[in-house]
Image (cartoon, helix red, strand yellow):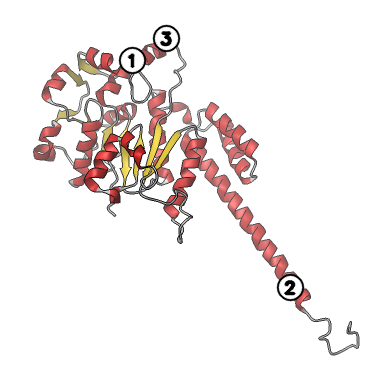
Amino acid sequence: METQTLAKQICPTTTQQWVKNGALLVDVREKEEIEQLAYDVPNIINIPLSELENRFTEIPKDKEVVMVCRGGGRSLKAANFLLDNGYDPEKVVNMQHGIIRWVQKGFPTKGDTSAVETKSEGSSCCGTTSSDKKAASATTTAPATKKQTITILDPALCCSTGVCGPDVDDALVQTAANVKWLKSLGYEVNRHNLSNDATAFKNYPKAVEKLQKEGADSLPYILIDGELVMTGKYPQKSEWLNWLEEEQKETSGTINESNELTEEKVQTLVALGAAIAAASQASLEFYTARAKEQNISLKDIAMAMNTGNQIKDVASQKIVEKANQLLNELQPAQSSSCCGGSGGGSSCC
């Protein structure tokens, strides 16, 4: 089965950081669109998607590049095209949600923003509308933002756990654990199986289009808010963390500088790991909530949880080893025959 990892996607806030660090923006919209409204950044070129196949060599391979457009769809196709033509996936990324979100964030543009603001009013793909932006400017506390919806479209399976067949599927077992973890963080996770839930696939037009072109061997598909982010394999936990970190930056509106680990935050993370090691559900829930209140990053929370799991696993293994040792020490006494001795005349028989 062919494995295809789509281009990495970053939010407009992260794009700002890339631009400050010298990245090149490549706008793949048509010329007339740019004449109406353009990104106002120092390092940008325009290569319409319709011309990319003939002009992509104008994009340097040794430079960090962010592909942009109006809503993020065309630029994602362009980024994937570059990866297929030998560009480095660590240097070429796509900006999610395009100039629509760029305008909503108040980032610099040239031209008339009214069309973008009017059309996006009340229909932002990530829950932040232009009216949200006005409300945010009137208060120092950002409005609550709905978390992204995660969808996993599986190939034909008898079940999604990975343990129901003759052989255990490690990827499915890990994915089932990751789904449980994502739900514990408050994300909505939908999972549909081609063999027993195929009708649900029609709710994801981009996935259906890909499935019709490439067949069932291109599954599984991973979607975030309806956008394909990975195909042909299940994400590792590190990949989920990267996506969630991007969402955290996007919903906060800035790259959070308060993520520095203070002594108080370190204490919370230590307690979080200890709660898992001690298998205390109440403590786990308490310190997870505290970590969220302290705005500790998802990556740091996950690392603390993983450390706690490792300690618990080591402790469990030590107990098993000790039990086996004690059993072995008891074994000779239990197996010696009380009637087998030949000397001393003290046989119990």
Assess disc 1: are there few (<14), some (14-19) or many (≥20) residues with their C-alpha within 10 Å of its C-alpha. Answer: many
Can residue 67 be seen by looking at this rendering? no
Q: Quadrant of residue 51?
A: top left
Q: Earlier in the sequence, mark 2 or mark 1?
A: 1
Instruction: Give the residue number, with chain letter if any, for mark 3.
Output: 138
Q: Secondary structure at mark 1?
A: helix
The Cα atoms of the two marked residues, 2 and 1, are separated by: 75 Å
Choose between 278 and 19: the one closer to the eye.
278
Q: Earlier in the sequence, mark 2 or mark 3?
A: 3
* Residue type pointed to by label 2: Gln
Q: Position of residue 205 (x, y in %)?
A: 28, 35
* Residue 51 drawn above or below residue 212: above
Closer to us: mark 2 or mark 3?
2
Assess disc 3: are there few (<14), some (14-19) or many (≥20) residues with their C-alpha within 10 Å of its C-alpha. Answer: few
Instruction: Give the residue number, with chain letter if any, for mark 2.
Output: 331
Instruction: Give the residue number, with chain letter if any, for mark 1.
Output: 130
Name the outermost residue toward the right.
345
Name the outermost residue toward the left.
54
The Cα atoms of the two marked residues, 1 and 3, are separated by: 13 Å
Closer to us: mark 1 or mark 3?
1
